[in-house]
Image: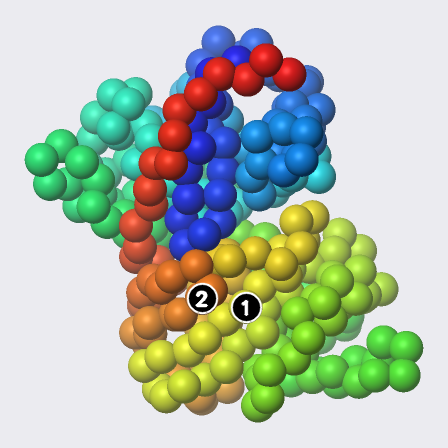
Amino acid sequence: MKFSKMQGNGNDFLVIEDLSGNLIGRESEVSKRLCNRKFGIGADGILIVRNNSKADIEMIIINSDGSYASMCGNGIRCFAKYVYERNIVKKHIISIMTGDGIKEADLTIKDDKVEKIKIFMGKEDYNPAKIPSINEGEIINKQILIGEESFIISSVRMGVPHTVLIEDQEMDINIGGRIEKYEAFPEGTNVNFCKVIDRKNIKVRTWERGAGPTLGCGTGNCASVVIANRLGLIDDSVTVIVPGGRLQVELKEEGVYMIGDAEFICDGISYI
């Protein structure tokens, strides 16, 4: 099986072309096998390239544990670069079908290479039923108790469920695993630890649902900006610094835009 390994802000993926649909029904098994960092190739997840009648191309996202993800901000930047540079979709603006609907990738091209990718991530959704959460109202600065520890959380759907904690002092990233499985989130939640530097810069660390600590999470960065902005802590255009790099997030009336790059690491063939 041929693959390309790519990364965006340290979030790494194996991109696999499946334009004929040969992997349908086996996606979860393939992801668990290939993403294993000891017995496979190693990655946070796989991105499957498929044809779609309603968009230029379709992206299927499978986490390293075999679970499906409807959207991934770092993944879609890698995906857009892949389909352009591999001549699958040779457009500067590409419509990509995801589990969260069609997303638009606006590519900055130089010498036929993709330098930057601007993704319209859509509009944030605070509706508990959409996150989803069993909470009756919006989850903004809500105190929860897990065991004997209390946490102040805010939650939003940004393609996938995200929970944000605003940090005064750095918290243990492993707290994310406890909040991920908190009873109020029947499908689990991604967890982001956000530290505000000033009104135009924040630092974010993410515990990704189904993957654990990651060097970067695009949807998590967007969710962190959305929440911090709603709390009045930051402006509408912000640089997000993550362990794996940085990107720009812009809030507009129509929704959220994410601007960043992506990188090829290698191409290969898997025999497992």
Labels 1 and 2 touching (C-beta < 8 A): yes
Task: Find residue 270 and name its label.
Answer: none
The residue positioned 35% from the left and 86% from the top of the image is 199
The first of marks 1 and 2 along the sequence is 1
Three-letter residue code for mark 2: Val
Mark 2: few, some, or many residues within 10 Å (few <14, many ≥20)? Answer: many
Q: Quadrant of residue 69?
A: top right
Asked if residue 27 lies left or right of residue 83, the reply is right
Asked if residue 191 lies left or right of residue 79, the reply is right
For the C terminus, give its image quadrant.
top right
Three-letter residue code for mark 1: Arg
Asked if residue 140 lies left or right of residue 262, the reply is right
Q: Quadrant of residue 263?
A: top left
In the rendering, at what x and y percent does residue 226 appear? 46, 72
Asked if residue 272 lies left or right of residue 52, the reply is right
Q: Secondary structure at mark 1?
A: strand
Q: Quadrant of residue 247?
A: bottom left
| Between 35 and 191, the one nearer to me in the picture | 35
Q: Does the image show residue 127? A: no
Q: Secondary structure at mark 2?
A: strand
In the rendering, at what x and y percent does residue 150 appear? 80, 85
For the view shown, which residue lies furthest in the front direction? 38
The residue positioned 56% from the left and 39% from the top of the image is 43
The residue positioned 50% from the left and 71% from the top of the image is 204
- Residue linked to disc 1: 205
- Residue linked to disc 2: 242
Q: Does the image show residue 151? A: yes
In the rendering, at what x and y percent does residue 58 appear? 44, 28
